[in-house]
Amino acid sequence: GHRALIAGCIAEAGSVGGPAVVVTFDPPPLAVLVPSAMKPPLTTKDERNELLLAAGVTKVVSLKTEAGLLALEPEAFFEDVVLGLFRAKAVVEGFNFQFGRARSGDTVELRRLCDWHRVRFREVQPLLDAGEPVSSSRIRAVIQAGDVSTAALLLGREYAISGAVETGARRGRTIGFPTANVGAVRTLVPGTGVYAVRATVDGVTHLAAANVEPNPTFGDDARKIEVHLLDFAGDLYGKELRVAFVKRLRDVLPFGGVNELVEQLRRDVAEARQVL
């Protein structure tokens, strides 16, 4: 959905002879207005900026979200920000865009303001997949359900998380399947399950299998992430590990003993290798 917006922005920039600029708010307005309603993001700010620039925009500008900015009426926001700050010659927005105090402005108002000030306006309609809009809420839902394959189709890329490798119980090492425990993840963690993943550390990507399960120590929604890198030997503690989810292999299961667990892990590794 955002890629469709960006494509429209780049096209308009070409028409008016100016840079294609993406404007974001930092932090998201919801984090200021209703912090309890905030959900884990799909990307960090740095990751998002990298993706936007890779999509072809000239520059990404983050406006600091503060009370004065949020209090501006739609017309004042247009005049102070769109015209005053950016001197925009064209504006591209999605069909459900709202702006100004209490989100009182919509695309009808935005089009009126653009017409009045002789600014080009393009309204981007929803990008549909299977008859439904591609949106962050839809993507978030399939990730939480563990359906990372569908998430990749909707995103146009494999969904990935990053975090620091922390010291764990080291039980995996004793049965021949050492795992990296990934902590301090700032984005949405996929639902419980075993996954085929690609794990990147120190710029090198490895085939891997990941186990995601509840971690009640840190609350009902917390997840413990353990990643086994195939054909890898080395110390990962303290390093940043990026985990790209390719396919969910199975549910998390209880086992009657170590031998039963080891046999299942062998099957998981073989399946992950085949998938990847």
Image (cartoon, helix red, strand yellow):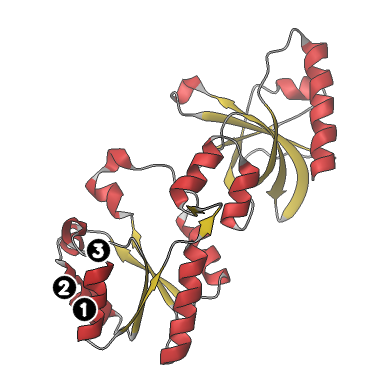
Query: Is residue 83 shown left or right of residue 200?
Result: left
Q: In front: mark 1 or mark 2?
A: 1
Report the disc number at residue 99: 3
Q: Residue at image x 70%, y 23%?
A: 170
Q: Closest to the observer: 230 or 18?
A: 18
The x and y percentages for residue 114 are: 25, 81
| Left or right: 112, with 132 as reference point | left
Q: Which residue is mark 1?
A: 113
Determine whether label 1 and label 2 are within 8 Å by CB: yes
Dot 1: what SS?
helix
| Above or below, 37 relative to 94 | above
The kind of residue tagged 1 is Leu
Q: Are marks 3 and 2 in contact (CB under 8 Å)?
A: no
Residue 146 sits in which quadrant? top right
Image coordinates of residue 37 in percent, x first then y, are 31, 40
- Is 76 left, or right, of 129 in this rendering? left
Pick the front one: 64 or 86 = 86
Say which amino acid is labelled 2: Glu
Q: Residue at x 30, y 48 (%)?
A: 31
Secondary structure at badge 2 equals helix
Residue 58 lies, with reference to residue 24, above or below; the image says below
**Amino acid type, mark 3:** Phe
Q: Which residue is mark 2?
A: 75
Quadrant of the drawing holding the C terminus: top right
